[in-house]
Amino acid sequence: MTREFNAGLDLVWDAFTKAELLDQWVAPKPLTAKTKYMNFEEGGKRFYAMVMPDGGEERWSIQEFSAIHPKTDFKMYNCFADADENPQLPGSDWSYTFSTANGRTTVKISIYNESFERMEMILEGFKLGFTASLENLEELLAAKS
């Protein structure tokens, strides 16, 4: 998927790579995100939860960063986990590529799953949730620009 943002590269890069900004947009409303820790470097991890309203159920995920080229691209492995960081279900490999022109930044996101069947299984709910998250990001970038 490709998305263009009306914001500069520095701000968009930070929104994807800094926990304090990720937590403001990555969870589709009415959920919120909370990062327990994040070490954005090759071999580093982010461990975070999407939290149901009123502090209810938490859905944890692990992101493991495998390649980072600042303000150009990064790759990570993403999987669901329990609160003790034990992976659950097979995860996906994600690739983010950033480019800029005329004060706008384009982000291309590619997601690879181990099988087509697995991708089909998660795709519908993912599309709705991730589209809502990207709309949250649009609002955050507008407020910070």
Image: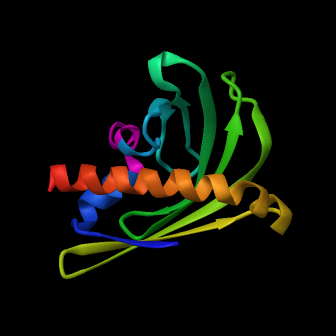
Question: Is 58 left or right of 19, judged from the image as shown?
Answer: right
Most frequent secondary structure within the magenta stretch? helix
Residue 76 in view here = no
The furthest residue to the bottom: 101
23 left or right of 85 in image = left
Which of these two is toward me, 129 or 104?
Answer: 129
- Whether residue 82 is visible to the viewer of this picture, yes or no, is yes
Q: How far across and down, in percent of the image, does residue 8 sit? A: 22, 66
- Which region of the structure is painted magenta? 17-24
Residue at the location (17% across, 49% down)?
143
State yes or no: residue 9 in magenta: no
The answer to which of 77 and 53 lies nearer the viewer is 53
Q: Position of residue 95 (x, y in %)?
A: 57, 66
Residue at the location (85% across, 63% down)? 117
Residue 111, image quadrant: bottom right
- How is colour applied across the structure in the image? rainbow
Q: In the image, residue 3 lies at what x, y percent?
A: 41, 71
Vertical position of residue 63 compared to residue 108: above or below:
above
Q: Is residue 107 above or below residue 40?
A: below
State the image quarter where residue 79 is shown. top right
Does the segment drawn in magenta span residue 19?
yes
**Quadrant (top left/top right/bottom left/bottom right) for the C terminus:** bottom left
Residue closest to the eye, 40 or 119 = 119
Residue 38, image x and y in percent?
A: 48, 37
